[in-house]
Image (cartoon, rainbow, N blue to C red):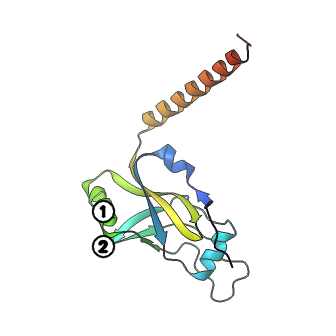
Amino acid sequence: MPREKGRKVVASNKKARHDYAILDTYEAGMALTGTEVKSLRAGRASLVDAFAQERDGELYLHAMHIPEYTQGTWTNHEPRRTRKLLLNRGEIDKLVGKTREGGFTIVPLQVYFSDGWAKVEIALAKGKKSYDKRQDLAKRDADREIARVSGRRGKGMDD
């Protein structure tokens, strides 16, 4: 059977970009069971409230929900089990060092298939304050208004 090419997004965490200031992103593999992969291929996963944490020199993804595979039998997986992230030692050391520094956390942004392999995009992030979130919303609204006006002007429909 020919291998898949390209990138197929399964789940994304839109709330993470709203709640956190993203400093750096990494692509990590995940240690999964067979029924988890089949459930992901069916497009079923949720990253709400998921986070990564260091334990024994390794990074683990907590609270990511992959529902049980519908055609699975007694070999089905636990939906919210802790999953090991597969990264290079240098990347792990860098991420762990930053999180120990204080104020930083590791959040998953997307789960996707890259050339047939299940991957997760994780980010080193810092929590935003509520006024930062309001400023981001105001800036986005202003940019949208500018784009709308310039689009009307380009069409000769001046206000």
Quadrant holding the N terminus:
bottom right
Secondary element at image label 1: helix
Relative to 73, residue 128 above or below = above
Q: Is residue 18 left or right of residue 92?
A: right
Q: Residue furthest front?
A: 2
State the residue lying farthest toward the bottom: 74
State the residue at coordinates (66%, 70%). 41
Label 1: few (<14), some or many (≥20) within 10 Å?
many
Residue 18, image x and y in percent?
51, 43
Coordinates of residue 45 in the picture (x, y in percent)? 62, 65
- x and y, in percent, of residue 25 in the image: 42, 54
Q: CA distance from mark 2 to mark 1?
A: 8 Å
Q: Nearer the viewer, residue 49 or 14?
A: 14
What residue is pinned by disc 1?
96
Depth check: give the residue in front, 109 or 70: 109
User: Residue 152 falls in which quadrant of the image?
Assistant: top right
**Badge 2 density bin: few <14, some 14–19, many ≥20, Cα 10 Å:** few
Instruction: Please name the amino acid that badge 2 sits on.
Output: Gly
Pinpoint residue 90: horizontal percent, then vertical percent: 30, 65
Instruction: Point out which mark residue 66 bears.
Output: none
